[in-house]
Image (spheres, grey):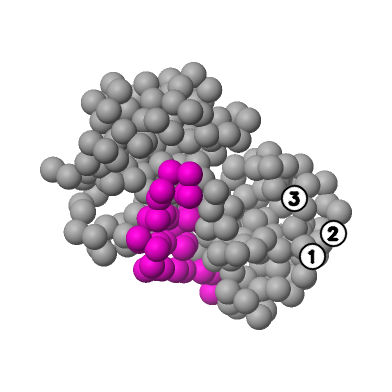
Amino acid sequence: MKKILFFDVDGTLYNSDKKLPSSAKEALLQARANGYELAIATGRAPYMIEELREELGIDTYVTLNGQYVVYKGEVIFTDKINDEILDELVKVSATQGHPVVFIDEKHMIASMPEHEGIRGSLATLHCPYPQVVPDYYKNNPVYQTLLFMREHEETQYIEAFPDIQFVRWHKEVCDVLPKGGSKARGIQKLLEKTGYTMESVIAFGDGTNDIEMLQQAGIGVVMGNGHIDAKKVADVQAPHVDDDGIYKVMKELELI
């Protein structure tokens, strides 16, 4: 059965230095030569992975945790939080002193200047501080929002916003998605377009936002550096991303 391979970016393709190891690039290109289709599944926005996509020659991708899906260069699915709910979230977070960052396919826009939580967490992605436009969401589609608050402050939002899910990836910030939004749902939308089945998917990831994808894929591969909850649901564990993990596990799975 023909297979399609979905790769997370941070901690999976990108190593601890936010670089693509030469061994990972070699593995992906060899897998393509062996007849496998390659795709990306990331929490990042499309504009943030342009260089990576060009280097690997990939034009199929699930971005923003499944909220913006592209197949062979064509946008086939988008989703976003209901406008009224997002407006209420922005207002509530402002009263708590918690800034947000709005993300679409081309931009990342902050609601507040010079916030250390924004600066510190985005620095881990090697992203600069965003432009500040507090009401950006009112006139532009926002496919994903980042909410900057600590873990002990999360419960109030979960209780107040049952139609939103909060996925933490840093001590300072959560991804904010519509209920049911995930990389797995984005992949399913893409599969409907292509004729592949979820059984034909091999997914590679490391984070909590990869859990649904790893669970539902025919084979879910978690990196050795992955989150413990991701490791619990994966079928295969790769070595650490910094130890040529992608190359070694693709060799183990006889993809290359």
Q: Position of residue 18 (x, y in %)?
A: 60, 35
Camera-side residue of 172 and 152: 172
Q: Nearer the viewer, residue 29 or 104?
A: 29
Position of 152 with respect to 256 (left or right) is right
Q: Residue at x 19, y 59 (%)?
A: 195
Amino acid type, callout 3:
Pro
Whole-number angstrom distance, CA of label 3 to CA of label 2: 12 Å
From the viewer's perspective, is residue 50 above or below residue 247? below
Q: Who's the residue at 68% across and 39% down the image?
A: 124
- Range of residues picked out in magenta: 53-82
Callout count: 3
| Earlier-in-chain disc, 3 versus 2 | 2
**189 drawn magenta:** no
Mark 1 vs mark 3: give the one in front.
3
Pointer 2 residue: 113
Mark 1 vs mark 3, CA separation in Å: 12 Å
Which amino acid type is marked by label 2? Pro
**Relative to residue 199, is residue 156 drawn left or right?**
right
Q: Which mark is residue 132?
A: 1
Indicate the amino acid at tag 1. Val
